Image (spheres, rainbow, N blue to C red):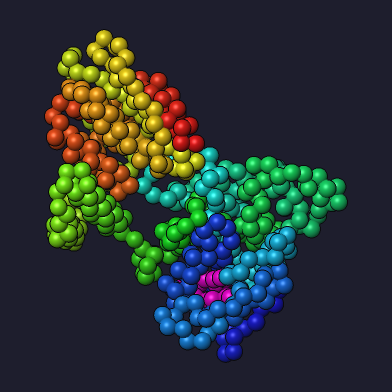
Amino acid sequence: MEFILEEGKHLHDECSTLILPGLSIGNVGQLAMDLLVSSMGAERIGYLDDPFVLPCVGNDAYGPVPRGDLALPLEAYDSPSNALTIVQQRSPVVKGMMVEFAKNLADFAAASGKKHIIVLSSLDSGRRQKIEISSGLQMYYLSSANADGTDGDCEKLGWKKLQEYNPAQRRWKYLSSLAEGNVMQEDSLSFEDELVDEDYYPSLPFAALFSCCKAKGLKVTCILCYCSEGDNIPESFQLAEAACKLLGLNTTKFQGIAVNPDLKARVLNLLASTAWSIWKARNSSVFQGVPVDPLHSIRQAVHLVDKVARGCPSQTRSRAPFDGRPARLSPWRPPSSWLHLNVDGLSLQDGRFAGCGGIACDVRGRILGGFGLALRGGSPLVAEAEAIQTGIRWALSQGWNQVVVFSDCLGLVSSIVEINPMVHWEIQVVAEDIRVILSQEPTVRISFIPRKENAFVHRLATVGLRQGG
């Protein structure tokens, strides 16, 4: 690998940290590099020429108007005020040559005096074993600070170590041997076996970069997040912000990186409420013959925008969006004559498959009916909300009144009954629809039930999920 300085440019000795992308699903690492370069006003000082990177060329990657400045596959940018060097990679590596490329990049980092290497990359959400109900993106990391990949600084930031890292596992071990130049012929032959699930993570580019930089004695930290193909701009924002937090940089001074979570929640709720209003107008027109009044929807949107603009901090603190944490709910016992409808929602494989189920009983415990349905997909929180919505509509279709719908998602129930009225944007439309139904049907209520008392309904939700699979 050869490094070519631009005319009149030079390396800055104070830039002791190198940030680079690990190419992966969604190009999140590369998007984060562009964000850091443009936000910090980093200066391009040169480019890297490597035989294992496919050639490509483009026109001015950052200017609003193309000026004829060529963008190349591997470019280096310096931000002396932040003591950072940023390498952007715009082209993939030749198949089978990732380790050789990583070795070359590690040699460049060591030769240029870098002390800390930060790799930003993404992981396929379809490989995630545990799905968490959270309003934020969970960051994962892998560090050379300790043999097991842990790092106290990363833990303090609330990140989780990549559990799939096991230095004794065959592929991680082989990768380490390749990076150190100690691989034996018999090791190579045994490694050519068919890949298994545990081989996925060490087969990614970030793993090669991690192993080769570590073999050079450099401190290396990989910051990772799960995502899918599509629009991954939000993930790139958070990945770039995570790198800044690790380095102790104030993200508020970087244009575009700092996102006020309160404002974000209000804006997302605004969009969800507007979409719900338009959907209700459409349904009223299709099913009830009510003429659609576009001006009415526009006036509603303007009103909601004004509410967001006037939103004060005290209101935001008292009405925080539901984030999956437990909430208090005043106990309510339905009269003995009311029917009980237990519901549950289930989501798997990052929301690709979802289902819901419900079962109705009278006061004596006699089963009156039940359902298990496939949903269109969505997060676990969405599945739980749609289970309540489906259960209420199903009960009304049976001609029942005096029905209490039980869900084992305490925070969700609390949000819908307006203990926490500003629900998460993801379920805003469903929650609004449930509230409208409850306001129109005073003999229908929702309440919380512990999960252990809702186990049988969970099986019906599984049946529904399988119908969609």
Taking the magenta stretch, the answer to whether it contains residue 248 is no
Quarter of image, res 417: top left
Quarter of image, res 296: bottom left
Q: Position of residue 333 (x, y in %)?
A: 19, 20
Residue at 51% from the left image edge and 47% from the top image edge:
125
Q: Nearer the viewer, residue 53 or 111?
A: 53
* Residue 411 can be seen, yes or no: no
Q: Is residue 328 left or right of residue 26?
A: left
Q: Residue furthest right?
A: 185
Q: Position of residue 401 (x, y in %)?
A: 18, 23
Q: Residue furthest bottom?
A: 8
Q: Nearer the viewer, residue 317 or 405?
A: 405
* Magenta residue span: 75-88
Residue at 50% from the left image edge and 81% from the top image edge:
60
Residue at 37% from the left image edge and 37% from the top image edge:
383
Quarter of image, res 329: top left
Most common secondary structure along the magenta stretch: strand
Taking the magenta stretch, the answer to whether it contains residue 84 is yes
Q: Position of residue 459 (x, y in %)?
A: 43, 24
